[in-house]
Image (cartoon, rainbow, N blue to C red):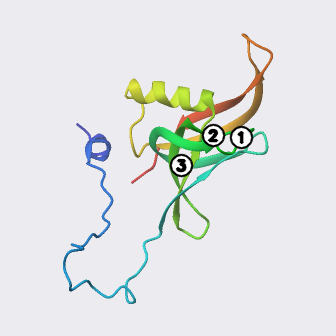
Amino acid sequence: MAKSETAELSLATTPQTLDVQAFDLTNNNLPDLESAHEMPLDFMSDYWTPENIGESKRVFFVKIDKSLVRDINDAEVVHELPCAFFLERTPKGEVRQIRNGSKRLVGALEVAYEQAMIQRGTPLLITYLGKKSNKTNSFKSDNWSIKPLVINV
């Protein structure tokens, strides 16, 4: 096996954990947080709604999961929307989580995940291609391009 193949294999099989500290809250001697440094990672998840055809994002795939959203017509009603979750690096160098619930995007990523074409941590280029007419009804759906990215490490 060539050296580059070995590196790619180890990248794909390395367990992916986030090294976030946790402390025993029953201990009366908790550390002082005033001197703590924040990690460049925001756990908030922003909903990404592309505005222009050709808008794209370079992201790392995280998961497909449900996101709670309020009904458009009745704010008291909450729905579970299947969403694709990603991590992206901001221009300031921070990492933030974004999500999108487009049925076509989520469906394509579910298939790619189930067929082991992508996994948690896979780098992707996702491009919004505009609206596409549905064949089964008069509605239009978002159209996407999803391409894996290769990173030279």
Image quadrant holding the N terminus, namely top left
**Element under disc 2:** loop
In the image, is 44 to the left or to the right of 14? right
Q: Distance between the residues labelled 1 and 3?
A: 33 Å
What is the CA distance from the residue labelled 3 to the residue labelled 2? 31 Å
Q: Mark 1: give few (<14), some (14-19) or many (20+) Cα within 10 Å.
A: few
Give the image location of residue 49, x and y in percent: 70, 45
Looking at the image, can residue 149 be seen? Answer: no
Identify the residue shown where x is 54% and y is 26%.
Answer: 107
Residue 138, quarter of picture: top right
- Spatial CA span between label 1 and label 2: 6 Å
Residue 16 picture location, percent across and down: 31, 51
Residue marked by disc 1? 74
Frontmost of labels 1 and 3 is 1
* Vertical comparison of 82 with 61: above or below: above
Residue 132 percent location from the top left of the image: 76, 24
Residue 108 shows up from this direction? yes
- Looking at this view, is 46 or 55 the one in front? 46
Q: What residue type is disc 1 on?
A: Asp
Residue sitting at x 72%, y 10%: 136
Q: Quadrant of the C terminus?
A: bottom left
Q: Which amino acid does label 2 sit on?
A: Val
Counting residues from the N terminus, which is met first, the one under dot 3 or under dot 2?
3
Mark 3, other Cα within 10 Å: few <14 / some 14–19 / many ≥20 = many
Above-or-below relation of 36 to 109: below
Task: Residue 59: give its label.
Answer: 3
- Sort mark 2 into few (<14), some (14-19) or many (20+) by Cα contacts within 10 Å: few
Residue placed most toward the observer, 68 or 55: 68
Please name the residue that numbered disc 2 is placed on: 77
Q: In this view, does 100 lie to the left or right of 130?
A: left
Q: Earlier in the sequence, mark 1 or mark 3?
A: 3
